[in-house]
Structures are given as C-alpha cells and as structure tokens.
Amino acid sequence: MKYITFILLFTSILFSNSTLVDIYRAQGINAVEKILNQSLSKKTYWDKFLANKDVSNGYYESINNILVCSKDMQNISIYDAKQNNKLVYSSKVITGEKKGNKQKEGDLKTPIGAYKLTKKLTKVDPFYGPLALVTSYPNKFDKSKKKTGSGIWIHGVPEDKKRDPFTKGCIALDNDNLRELYKKIDMKKSLLIIKENSKSIIKKDEISNILAQLFSWKQAWGESNLEKYLSFYSKEFKKSDGSGIKNFKRYKKRVFAKNEEKTIIFSKINIIPYPNDLNKNIFKITLFEKYHTKSYRFIGNKELYLELINNKIKILFEG
C-alpha cells in the first residue's frame, strides 16, 4: 500500500490529477509505474532535480563526507555532501615518492581513483603517528586492471617530525591535522577520491546524463529488451570474475529469453568521478539493488564503472 501511495504522489508532480486517475483507472498501477520509469530516463527531469545542487565532486545519496586528495597540490579537503558539497576542512599532505598512478607493489606511487575508508588503526608504529585510516586500494576496478599492492593509508608522522618529504604510496599529514580530519568524518559514510590534477571539473550536465541513462538501462533490463540493454556496455567490459563482453552477451541472451517479469529497485545511488590514467572520462556508480523474478532474487550493493563518451554511458565493469 505504501508503494502504491508513493507512486501516486510522485506521479501527481508530473501529471495533472485527471491524467493520473485516467491512466490508473484504465490501465492500473503498472502503467503508472511505466510512466515513472520513462520520466526517470529523461535528462530533462534530472536537469531540474539537480538545478540547485553542487555536483562538482559527484552526486551522493548515501555518502556524507567526500575526501578529495589532489596530488599536484599536495592537499586533502573534506566536503559535506549533505550540505550541498560544503568545504569543511583542508590540510596539506605528502604523498608517494614517485609520480603517476600506482600499478604494482613497491612502486612508491600513490594510487588515483575512488576508495572507501575501511577501518581505523590506533595500534600503529610511531612512525605513522597516532592513527591510520585504511583505504580499500586495490578496489575491484584496480584488480580488473591487474594492479597489485596494499596498505595504502591516510596516516600521521613521527612525533619528532623527522621523516622524508614523501611516502611509499600513502597519504600523510601532520598529527594534529590528522586528528582533526578524523573528527570531521563518519568513516562508514565517507569516500576518498585521489586525483593527479586538481583542475579536473565535473559538469552538472554529465551527472544528469548518467542518471537518465542509468534508469534507461534499468528500464531496458526490466523489459527484457536485450538489444537496448546491451547497448549500454563497452566492448572492453569485464565482470568481477574476469569474463568479457562475449560471455556476458551469451549469458544475458539466455536470461532474457525467459522473459520473466522483473522487479528492479535502485536506491542509495552515488555517482563518483573516477580519476584514472586511461585517458577516459570514468565514473564509479554504487547503489543498493533489489531484484527479483520468479526464479532469482538479489538484494545487495552493486558497483558499476562506466565511461562517458559523447554523452553516452558505456559500462566497463560490473560487480
């Protein structure tokens, strides 16, 4: 009942009451839901939705704190996603001895990309200061690119201040600044973006396009429209098991041939600009998905990495 009430209230924003009632009376709630899906697939809807939102660091529904480390500026800043991307803290840092994106264990480079903060360590060697925040490097996309290494932290410095002006790949800042940074974040709802160039700018038009096409992809999926669904995937696509686009197409052809009625619900959507050295305009999408058919059910988190090419999304990785 709550679900139906939500659909009716939401649709009334888009249509006159008489139109809404006529559609519901003649065709039922499924027809109303189809209209909603079509509306969510239109960029004009998202343009209006984002009109007063600052999305220069991405679009976030379940992330509160965005930590942005710019290697060229040797700086880390915290933005509050719940306060329209408000800058709440900034500090100087030091990063890896070698320039460029981390590729392998021991290359002395700080990775670029987007990472979770997975845990806080307090029992660390004094060389790392009072605490360390562990990142999720290498993430799923890194692993799909055969990157290696581990132990990329945000940490402090020795109390006597005697250390090299670079790290082995971590991000380090003065101990007082590290303590202050930790106080200002909720680790479970924080995200770290590490970029090489501080001048990179995310356009609102890009976020609108991605949101509209994300729901267009979802609609094609729900309607078992195989051709349209697969059009959103890159030729370079990889699954988390390492399989490529050919195997994926064969698998989806078998699944879509069943033509089962599907329920697909997306929530907690985050669209994260993903710095990279591939010369691609990449975004990481995280969302909470509820999916079920007569033969299969999935409830959990989903990750997509996609490239935006001429305003069209092409999914590179799904896991």
Image: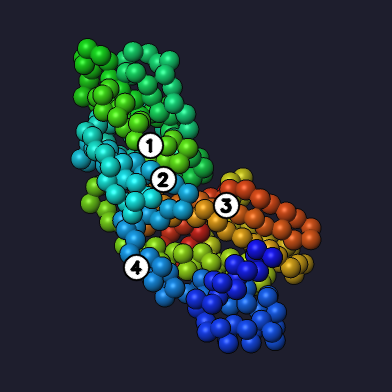
Q: Dot 4: within a 10 Å radius of its alpha carbon, few (fewer than 14), some, or many (20 or more) residues?
A: few
Direction from residue 217 to residue 3 in the image, left or right: right
Look at the numbered disc 2 and give the secondary structure of its residue.
Answer: loop
* Mark closest to the chain's N terminus, 3 or 2: 2
Measure how far apart labels 4 and 3 are at the Cα level: 24 Å
Give the number of the disc on residue 51. Answer: 4
What residue is shown with label 1?
Answer: 185
- Residue 109 lies, in percent from the top left, at 33, 32
Q: Dot 1: within a 10 Å radius of its alpha carbon, few (fewer than 14), some, or many (20 or more) residues?
A: some
Amino acid identity at mark 4: Ala
Identify the residue shown where x is 44% and y is 64%: 210
Pointer 2 with pointer 1, Cβ within 8 A: yes
Look at the numbered disc 1 and give the secondary structure of its residue.
Answer: loop
Identify the residue shown where x is 52% and y is 53%: 268
Residue 89, above or below 18:
above
Measure how far apart labels 1 and 4 are at the Cα level: 27 Å
Give the number of the disc on residue 224. Answer: none
Identify the residue shown where x is 33% and y is 54%: 84
Pointer 4 with pointer 2, Cβ within 8 A: no
Amino acid identity at mark 3: Phe
What residue is shown with label 2?
Answer: 64
* Mark closest to the chain's N terminus, 4 or 2: 4
Q: Dot 2: within a 10 Å radius of its alpha carbon, few (fewer than 14), some, or many (20 or more) residues?
A: some
The quadrant the N terminus occupies is bottom right
Pointer 3 with pointer 2, Cβ within 8 A: no
- Residue 305 lies, in percent from the top left, at 48, 53
Q: Dot 3: within a 10 Å radius of its alpha carbon, few (fewer than 14), some, or many (20 or more) residues?
A: some
Direction from residue 242 to residue 174 in the image, left or right: left
Look at the numbered disc 3 and give the secondary structure of its residue.
Answer: strand
Direction from residue 1 to residue 170 in the image, left or right: left
What residue is shown with label 3?
Answer: 288
